[in-house]
Amino acid sequence: MNINKKLFYAIKNNKFCQKFANNILLGLATFPIFMGMNLLFSSKANATANITIQPISWHIIGLDSNKVTDGPDTFNIGARVCNVGTSDATNVQARFVFDNSNQYINLTGNDTLTLDSLPAGATSHPPGNTGAIPNNCRDFYFNVVITRDRKAYDATRLYRIEATADGLGTVSTPSNRELYVEKLVSQNRNSVLSFDGPTVVEQGKTYTYTVTGSTAPGGYEQLVFATNFPNTFFEILSVSTNYSTPSGTSNNANYGDGCGWDPNIGQTPPKGTYRSCIGPVNYGNDGKVGADFTTTYQVKIIGTGSASVTNLVYDFSGSSYHYNSDYGTGVNTKVVTAVEATSPDLTISKTDGNTDFNAGDNLCINTCAVIRVIVITATRKVIN
C-alpha cells in the first residue's frame, strides 16, 4: 500500500481527521461565494459622494468714489460646489459665513442655499475660460450689501462659503479671504447695451436672461459683469459670457480674472502682492479681458417677490477701480416680479374627427363636464 492510500484510510478511520477534512472542503466550496459577497459589499461601500468647493467671485466690492448714494451697493459673491465622488450628493447646502464683524458689510437675502441632489462627475471645474459648467457642479451666489456711508471706504470683513451634504463633512473656501470696500470711479467706457428677459416670472420655472455690454477695447486686468439677482427668489443655474478681447474667449462665472490676482490677505505692494496682479495670466498674452461681451443666465425661480434688477460692470485697470455710469438707469435695469405658479381652474380636452374646416369658420363643440350637472357648449374660432 502506497503512502496516499495509507493517508486515505487514516483519514477515513479517524473521525477527527474526517471532520477536519470536511471543514476544509466546505471552506473551499464557500470561499468564492464569500469573496463575491465581499466584493459586492465593498463596491457599494465605495460608491459615495465627495464634494469640493472653490470661490468664483472677486473679493473687491465698493461704493462710488464721490457720492456714496450713487452707483452700486450690492454685489454677488459666490462659490462653485462640485461632486467628484461616485454617487449623487443629496441635500447639498451652501452657507455664507462671516468670521468677524463690520457694521458696513453685511448680507442681504438668504445666507444658506440648498440643492436636492448633485450628480457625480469627474472634474472639480474651475471658473474662467474652461467651458460650460458640467452637471456635477453648481454655483451658489450670495448678495453682499455695503452701507452707503463714507466710513465704509477701505472697510474689510473676513468671509468664507462652506458646503456639505447628507453623510458628508463640511468643505470651505479659503479662510484667509476678506471682502474689501474700494472707491469705484464712475466711467462711461463701461456700459450696458441691452438687457433681455421676462419681467413677470412664475415660481418653479426656469428662465433665460441675456445682457450685452462693452468696456474699453483692450479689456481690463480684472473685470466683473454681474446682474444683481436677489437670491431670495432667483437661483442662478449657469452663467456664460463671451468676450471679444481676447478673441473667442469665454467665462462660466461673473468674474474675469485676467491677470492672475492675489486675493490672499497679506501686505500690499511694494512690500507684498495682496490686491495686485501676480500671474499667471488667464486671458491672452497681456492678462486683459473685456471689450464687447454677452452674458447669458439660466435662472430658476425659487420664491416670490419683486425687485429692481440691474447690471454692474466694474474693473481694475492701472491703479484704480471703475464702474459703469449707466448703473441702474435706462435699458440697464428692469423690475422683475416673481409670482406663485398658476394653473387653470378647469382644463377640457375635446377631439373632433371632422377635419373639413376652412379658416374663418366657427367650430362648435358640445362638451359635458361634471360641474353641478351643467352642459357646457364651447365655441372656438379657427385662426390662421
Image (cartoon, helix red, strand yellow):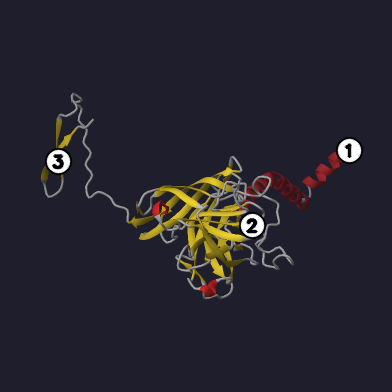
Of residues 63 and 129, the one nearer the viewer is 63
Is 348 positioned to the left or the right of 65 in the image? left
- Helix, strand or loop at label 3? It is strand
Mark identifier at residue 278: none
* Residue indicated by mark 1: 2
- Amino acid tagged 2: Gly
* Residue indicated by mark 3: 368
- Amino acid tagged 3: Cys
Is 362 positioned to the left or the right of 53 in the image? left
Residue neighbourhood size for the residue with mark 1, other residues' Cα within 10 Å, grouped as few (<14), some (14–19), many (≥20): few
Q: What whole-number distance in Å separates the C-alpha atoms at marks 2 and 3?
A: 74 Å
Q: Quadrant of the N terminus?
A: top right
- Picture layout, residue 297 above or below residue 306: above
- The answer to which of marks 1 and 3 sits earlier in the sequence is 1
Furthest residue toward top: 356
- The answer to which of marks 1 and 2 sits earlier in the sequence is 1
- Helix, strand or loop at label 1? It is loop
Q: Nearer the viewer, mark 1 or mark 3?
A: 3
The residue depicted at 71 percent of the width and 63 percent of the height is 273
Can see residue 372? Answer: yes
Q: Nearer the viewer, mark 1 or mark 2?
A: 2
- The answer to which of marks 2 and 3 sits earlier in the sequence is 2
Q: What whole-number distance in Å separates the C-alpha atoms at marks 1 and 3?
A: 98 Å
Place of residue 195 in the rendered image (x, y in percent of width and height, measured from the top left) = 42, 49
Q: Quadrant of the C terminus?
A: top left
Is 341 positioned to the left or the right of 161 in the image? left
- Picture layout, residue 156 above or below residue 229: below
Mark identifier at residue 318: 2
Of residues 283 and 6, the one nearer the viewer is 283
